[in-house]
Amino acid sequence: MTLSSIFSIDDSPFYGNISNTDKYKLKQEERLSEAKKLLLQITSFKGKRNVENTLVPYDEIIILLNVAASQSNLLENVHPDSTIRKISEEYSQKVSSFASELSLNKDVFDALNSIDIANADETTKYYLQKTLRDFKLSGVDKDKATREKIKKLRDELVLISQAFSRNIREGVRSIYANNVAELDGLPKDFIDLHKPETDGRIKLTINYPDAVPVFTYAKNELLRKKLFMEYNNRAYPKNIEVLDNLILKRSELAVLVNFNNYAAYVTADKMVSSEKNVSEFIEKIAKAAKEKTKKDYEQLLARKKLDNTSSTEISPWESGYYSELVRKQNYNFDGQKVRPYFQYNKVKQGILDVTSKLFGVEFKQNKNAPVWHNSVECWEIFENGKLIGRFYLDMHPRENKYNHAAQFDIRAGVKNKQIPEAALICNFPGGKENDPGLMEHSDVETFFHEFGHLLHTIFAGNQKWAGITGISTEWDFVEAPSQLLEEWAWDVKTLQSFAKHYQTNEPISEVLVNQMRRASEFGKGLQVSQQMYYAKLSLSCYDRNPSDVNTTELVKNLREKYTPYKYVDGTHFQCSFGHLDGYSAIYYTYMWSLVIAKDFLSMFDEENLMDTKVAKKYRDNVLNPGGSLPAKNLVQNFLGRDFNFDGWAKWLERD
C-alpha cells in the first residue's frame, strides 16, 4: 500500500473511515504501519541522498503522524462515547511516542543532513533547514543514553498533559440559585431556559453559556461570587499535582537539551527568540497600559460607589457586572439590547457569507457527511468550483466535551495528496429545544476569531510539504490572522448584513453598533493588564527551577502585581488554565500577535473592510503561504516593512 492510495484517492469526510471502534483502530494502525515502512525505507537506503529518496518519504511519515495525532486529539476532546475517547487517548500516546522516537533518530537526521539541495527550490530548502533545526532542538545530537531519557520524558509528558486536559474537561461544577428572584438582571431568554427543579432551585454551571451572563448581568452579588468560586476551582484539587509534575518534567527535558529552563527552550524557535525577550515584552505592554488600567478601574469603583458609598475596591466577581453598568451609564450602551440581534444561526450564516465574499470562496453544507454527534455540521469550501477544504462545526456545550473555544486540525492539506480538514469546537448558546441561541457580542467576536484560524488552515493547506502546510508558522504569529478577523465583528456594514432581530428580523441599527463600539473602548486597559497577568504567570511557571514554583503563590502575587484586583483566597485558577499545558510558557503570543494584527489592520480601509483587493493581497501574502516562509517574511511581504507598535498603541489609547 502506497501513501498516495491513502491520501490522494480518498478525500471523503474523515469520520466515515473511523465511525466505529474497529474501523478507528484499523485506520490508525494502518497509518502507523505505513509510517514504519517509510522509516525503514529511509534508514536502509544505501545510495546518494536526494530530495526524492529521503525528504519525500520523511514528509510522508509526517503526513501520516499528523493525521493520526490530529484525529485522536479531536475525538478524545469531543466524542460522546467514553470508549472512543479512551481509544483516542491511547493512540495519541502511540503517535506521540513514534514522533518522539523519530525526532531522536540520528540515522534519519544524518540522512536528511546529507541531502544535496543545491538545485532545490527555495521552499524545499527552507523546509529542510527548519526540519534539521527541529531535530537539533529535540536533542538528536545527544548521546544514546541522553536520547533515551528524552524519549522517556516525552512519553511521560503526553500522559500528564492528557490528565490535565481530562480533568478540566470533566470538571464541570455548578451552583444553585434558590429561586427565580435570584436571577434578577439576567436576560429573559436565559431565565426561560433555566427552569426551577422540583425544590424550586435553579442549576447554573460554570460553562460559558451560564457563566458569562451571570457574571455580566446578575444583580445578586452572592450568586456571582458563588459561581466565581466554582469557576475558578475547576479541576481543583486534581490538577495541582498534575501541573506541578508537568512543570517538573518539562524542566528536566529542557536541561537535557542544554537549556537553562523550559521557557528558554520553548521560545528558541519563536519570533521572540528568548524568554528574556518575552519578559521585556510583557513589561513593555504592562507599562503602556498602566494609566489606562488605572482610569478603567477608577470608573468601575465610581460606579460601585453609587450603590455603596463606602466601597473601596472592586472584587473580581464584580468586574464584569460593573463594567456593564459603566457602559450603560457612561456610554449609553446596554449589552442586553444587542443580544436579540445575535442569534446563533444567523451569526453562523453571516460569518460564512462575509468571508465567502471577502476571500472569493463558496461554502456548501454536506448534510450526508458522517459526524460524531447529531449536532455537528459538515461544511465544504470551494474555489472556482474546486473543493479546497472541509470543516466541521461542533458549537454547543454537552457533557464530557471540550469546554472552551478552539480550532482542531483533522487532516493537514498537502498539494496533490490530501485536502485540509478541520473543526471548530465551541460552546455557544443554542442547540437546545426552544433556545433561540442569543449570543453575547463577545461570543460573536470569538466566532470570528476561531473562524480566522479555520480559514488560515484551509487556505494554507496547499503546500508541497506537510511540515510547512497549514498553520505551521512560528507560534507567536499564529494568532495574528484570527485576531485580525475579529475586526469584522465590530464593523457596522458587516454586522448589518446578518445581525437581525430574532423576532422582527430588523437589522441592527448603526446607532446601536456605534454605541457598542464606543462602549468597547472602555476596559481595554483592564483587558491588557489581565492578559499580561496570564502571560507572566505562563512564563513564571517555566522560567525558573521547579523547586521555586508554587503555582498558587504565583497566581496570587502576579494577579495583584499586574491587575488592580486582589487574589481571592480559596481559588485555584491555574488548575483550569489549559494554556499552561498547551501554550506552556508562551501565553505572551496572544498580545504579540495582537500587535501584528493591529498593524495589519492599517492596510485595510476601516470604512470599507470588505475591499476584496486588500483581502486578496492579505490572503496571498499571509494566509496562503502557511509555514513556507518565516513569519517575519510574511509580515514584510504584506506590510512592506517589519511590524511596529503604532497601530496597537493607537488602539489602546482610543477613547
Image: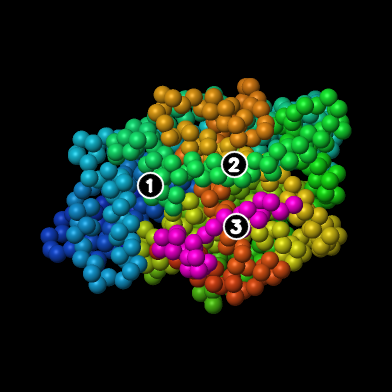
Q: Which residue is mark 2?
A: 286
Q: SS for tag 3?
A: helix
Q: Could you tell me the amino acid type at mark 1?
A: Ala
User: In terms of image quadrants, where is residue 112?
Assistant: bottom left
Q: Could you tell me the amino acid type at mark 3?
A: Asp
Q: Position of residue 472 (x, y in %)?
A: 43, 56
In the image, what residue occupies the spot 83% across and 24% down?
310
Q: SS for tag 1?
A: loop
In the image, what residue occupies the spot 46% across and 39% down?
585
Foreground mark, 3 or 1, reads 3
Q: CA distance from mark 2 to mark 1?
A: 23 Å
Of the numbered discs 3 and 1, the one sitting upstream in the chain is 1
Q: Bin the neighbour count of mark 2 within 10 Å (Cα to Cα): few under 14, some 14-19, many 20 and up.
A: many
Q: Which residues are magenta?
A: 629-655
In the image, what residue occupies the spot 65% across and 25% down?
568
Q: Which residue is mark 3?
A: 646
In this view, the residue farthest toward the top is 569
Task: Determine the main secondary structure of the stretch shown in magenta.
Answer: helix
In this view, the residue farthest toward the left is 46
User: In terms of image quadrants, where is residue 181?
Assistant: top right
Of the numbered discs 3 and 2, the one sitting upstream in the chain is 2
Closer to us: 38 or 114: 114
Q: Could you tell me the amino acid type at mark 2?
A: Ala
Q: Are marks 3 and 1 in contact (CB under 8 Å)?
A: no
In the image, what residue occupies the spot 55% across and 62% down?
455
Whether 373 is drawn above or below 304: the answer is below
State which quarter of the image contains the N terminus: bottom left
Q: CA distance from mark 3 to mark 1?
A: 26 Å
Q: Is residue 170 left or right of residue 419?
A: right
